[in-house]
Image: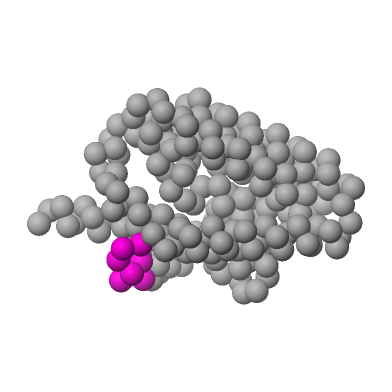
């Protein structure tokens, strides 16, 4: 769990620095920084999405995932959790908690680095990928918190629960982690990250939370194929 804890600490420290810097940044500068982050997230998402070797599977994953997420109201649940935490801890702090919490949670938890890095740590104790992710997350947390508010800080709890769970299940998941499967999970995650970028840039509201179940479709697909 060392890599996961380092990742969590990096986000906490980055968020605290972001809160401090936020007071010295004017609205225009914050908007420009956020646009830069949004464009960067778009590039990251596109790069990951292009890893797919099966475009049809990618489309099916997003459609089925969207249906499942919409029926289960995943995004509403994430927003509800964020709002509950905000009411409990805000004590008069300026709003926007839920937006920062949900967006940061999606950015940090959706993607191959979170999955593969956690599995590597669980299977053979290799935390290198998670250390790299920690550096990237820590830097982005500074900007996210300065622009989206202190809700980003609590995304560290999501990282701990999500990646920590995968680490603990690493031994069971490792045999299933083929290169093809990782690529398809990365591709689906890349499209979701692309959606996050569009949201950050306020180009179009994408319900990324409801699309989250899409990352489960490739593993299910490969499992079905393995039966034949």
Residue 9 sits inside the magenta stretch: no
Q: Is residue 131 left or right of residue 19?
A: left
Q: Is residue 223 left or right of residue 138?
A: left
Residue 89 percent across, percent down from the top left: 74, 41
Residue at screen point 12% across, 53% down: 227
Seen as rendered, the residue at the extreme left is: 228
Q: Is residue 143 visible?
A: yes
Answer above or below: position of 212 versus 13. below
Magenta region's main secondary structure? helix
Answer above or below: position of 111 versus 10. below
Residue at screen point 48% across, 60% down: 47
Seen as rendered, the residue at the extreme bottom is: 204
Residue at screen point 25% across, 44% down: 176
| The magenta segment | 52-59
Residue 185 percent across, percent down from the top left: 37, 54
In the foreground, 94 or 169: 169
Q: Is residue 90 left or right of residue 167?
A: right
Answer above or below: position of 137 versus 56. above
Residue 58 sits inside the magenta stretch: yes
Q: How many marks?
A: 0
Residue 157 percent across, percent down from the top left: 58, 38
């Amino acid at each position: 769990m060392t890599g996961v804890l380092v990742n969590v600490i990096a986000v906490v420290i980055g968020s605290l620095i972001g809160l401090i810097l936020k007071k010295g940044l004017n609205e225009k500068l914050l908007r420009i920084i956020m646009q830069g982050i949004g464009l960067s997230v778009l590039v990251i998402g596109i790069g990951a999405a292009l890893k797919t070797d099966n475009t049809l599977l990618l489309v099916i994953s997003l459609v089925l995932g969207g249906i499942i997420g919409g029926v289960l109201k995943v995004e509403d649940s994430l927003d509800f959790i964020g709002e509950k935490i905000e009411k409990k801890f805000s004590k008069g702090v300026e709003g926007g908690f839920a937006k920062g919490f949900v967006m940061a949670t999606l950015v940090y938890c959706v993607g191959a680095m979170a999955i593969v890095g956690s599995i590597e740590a669980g299977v053979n104790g290799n935390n290198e990928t998670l250390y790299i992710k920690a550096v990237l997350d820590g830097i982005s947390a500074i900007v996210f918190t300065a622009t989206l508010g202190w809700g980003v800080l609590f995304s560290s709890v999501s990282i701990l629960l999500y990646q920590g769970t995968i680490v603990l299940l690493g031994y069971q998941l490792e045999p299933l982690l083929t290169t093809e499967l990782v690529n398809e999970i990365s591709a689906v995650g890349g499209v979701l990250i692309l959606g996050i970028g569009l949201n950050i840039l306020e180009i179009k509201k994408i319900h990324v939370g409801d699309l989250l179940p899409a990352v489960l479709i490739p593993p299910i697909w490969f499992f079905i194929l393995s039966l034949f």
